[in-house]
Image (cartoon, rainbow, N blue to C red):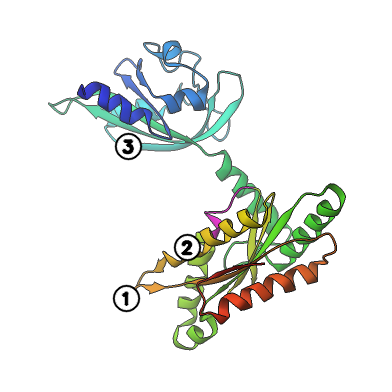
Amino acid sequence: MDKLVLDQSILDCLYDGLYVLDRERRITFWNQSAERLTGYSQEEVLGRPCSDDLLMHLGERGEQLCLERCPMALAMADGQVHEAEVFLHHKEGHRVPVRLRAAPLRDAGGNIVGAVEVFGDRSPHLAAQQRIQELERMSLLDELTRLPNRRYLLEQIKSRLHELRRADWPFGLLYMDLDQWEAGQERRSRPRSEALLQLVSRTVAHNTRAFDVVGRWGGGEFLAVVPNVDLDKLGKVAERYRALVAESALPGPGPEEAVTISVGATMAREEDTVQSLIVRAGQSLFLSKEVGGDRVTVR
């Protein structure tokens, strides 16, 4: 395969948008993800200046970056990598929040001949930040793990039970607990125990769907409220959490410390109360613990 074709095929496989400018800031390459994120096709942008009513990056305060602080222009001017969080102009007129990185391109002699920019949609990241800020404001966030706290989880379960009875919207509950947590407390320092909790929290939080809620119930226990699933899918979500935590480890000093969780999973029923649902999930968790932990029990 021709190297140029191969290189373009690789760049088109990237999830993030990528484009290249020459020294005159004309667009010379535009990958498929750039098309998806901006709405502009290659045919519409190639050969045009990037400031030609195309992306028109705005800063956090609404300033036009193309006029003064364009990351691509800065990269070509000083030869450094520049990063920014901006709002680009979509073809349909709206603004899309993106995180970008611009770097200079050099020829074989080391001369700067252009620049490349990689950019990705940060809408989910912004939504998560806003959610955390709102939870903080309402005192619904666990200070240590930065996850929703027990109070918020109870409200979520109550709300989901109401939706189940009113509109037949199914949901499941996962009850997760760190294996050997109490025994480990005796040999770990408090900072080490807290770091382990934070490790598990990050693992589950980063692998949770946008419409699911996972929070800290207390101690080494976590609950996840998982809507729009059946029992089989709920079990797969639980198994994903278990497997991802089992493949995580807390770095030294000393050897890495592995951690596992046991999970109990159950579907909510119309006749459930908040308490009965949590108790049933807890009973499933107990069965996972009985066989040695690092297990999922669905019932």
Q: CA separation, marks 1 and 3?
A: 36 Å
Going by the image, does 72 lie left or right of 148? Answer: left
| Extent of the magenta region | 204-210
The label on residue 243 is 2
Mark 1 or mark 2, earlier in chain? 2
Q: Which residue in the structure is indicated by mark 3? A: 81
Q: Is residue 12 above or below residue 81?
A: above
Mark 2 residue element: helix
In the image, 271 versus 250, the foreground residue is 271
Q: CA separation, marks 1 and 2?
A: 21 Å
Residue drawn 59% across the image and 62% down it: 146
The label on residue 271 is none
Q: Position of residue 200 (x, y in %)?
A: 51, 66
Going by the image, does 217 lie left or right of 60? Answer: right
Residue drawn 53% across the image and 71% down it: 295
Mark 3 residue element: loop
Residue type at tag 1: Pro
Q: CA separation, marks 2 and 3?
A: 37 Å
Residue type at tag 3: Val
